[in-house]
Image: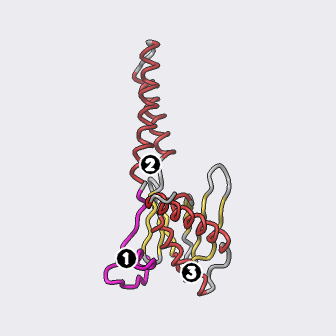
Amino acid sequence: MGRRDDVCRGPFDAPADGPDSAAQATNDRDWTQELWSSVRCGGVLLVLLLLVDWGTGRLALWRAALWLALAGLLFVVLYPARVSAGGNWLASRRLVREYRVRTDLLVSVRCLDGISQRLLLRDALGGRVEIDPEVFVRNPQLWFCLDEGARKAAADGSLLCGATALQRISRRVDQETARAVFKASGLE
């Protein structure tokens, strides 16, 4: 069984020097499930709207196109971000664009509260990523990659604010991981 640091390393434990190095990437395991869920929501809305129009006898081509556009808009709104991490980088790919930060050059980490909690990461190169902290709870490998880079940034003195936010997420990830281990071993 490998060390906790080995999760983010590439072949032969070669250190990753840059964000585009050949380090092995870790991806969000639940992304495809969330993607299919957003496709299903858009499809169900489209089918329901078409059935209502057909049942009332008002189905027309222009109305079907309008319902298709509305279902497409729902899909775009629900489209999940694909989060991946590797040696000293973390990326969040949306429908059109990918956002990337260097974790070893983090400058700030902030928790944004609102309808859904978000974690805002900024690096010294101007990179900015907004991620749902639940992604780290569901995927400890992603958290370990971020934590390793954040520790390097804190040791170098570039991480100016955000240690409290990282500690909160670390505790939550540790609690969920321990709960999963106890559940898998039958000790719950």
Q: Residues within 10 Å of mark 3 (few under 14, many from 20)?
A: some
Which region is colored magenta?
1-29
Q: Amino acid at mark 3?
A: Arg
Q: Residue at x 49, y 60 (%)?
A: 187
Q: Amino acid at mark 1?
A: Met
Q: Amino acid at mark 2?
A: Glu
Q: Spatial distance from mark 1 to mark 3, Cα to Cα?
A: 23 Å
Outermost residue to the front: 187
For the residue labelled by badge 1, is the local secondary structure a helix, a strand or a loop? loop
Q: Spatial distance from mark 2 to mark 3, Cα to Cα?
A: 30 Å
The x and y percentages for residue 65 are 42, 29
User: Residue 107 versus residue 113: which sits nearer the camera?
Assistant: 113
For the residue labelled by badge 2, is the local secondary structure a helix, a strand or a loop? helix
Q: Is residue 6 one of those drawn in magenta?
A: yes
User: Residue 174 versus residue 154: which sits nearer the camera?
Assistant: 174
**Which quadrant of the figure has residue 127?**
bottom right
| Numbered label attached to residue 1 | 1
Question: Which part of the image, by quadrant, shows the N terminus?
Answer: bottom left
The x and y percentages for residue 70 are 48, 34
Judging from the image, the colouring scheme is secondary structure
Taking 147 as reference, is 93 above or below it? Answer: above
**Which residue bears the numbered disc 2?**
34
Main secondary structure of the magenta stretch = loop
The x and y percentages for residue 114 are 67, 52
| Numbered label attached to residue 151 | 3
Which numbered mark, 2 or 1, is in the foreground of this view? 1
Left of 120 or right of it: where is 178? left
Q: Spatial distance from mark 2 to mark 1, Cα to Cα?
A: 30 Å
Of callouts 1 and 3, which one flags the residue occurring earlier in the amino acid sequence? 1
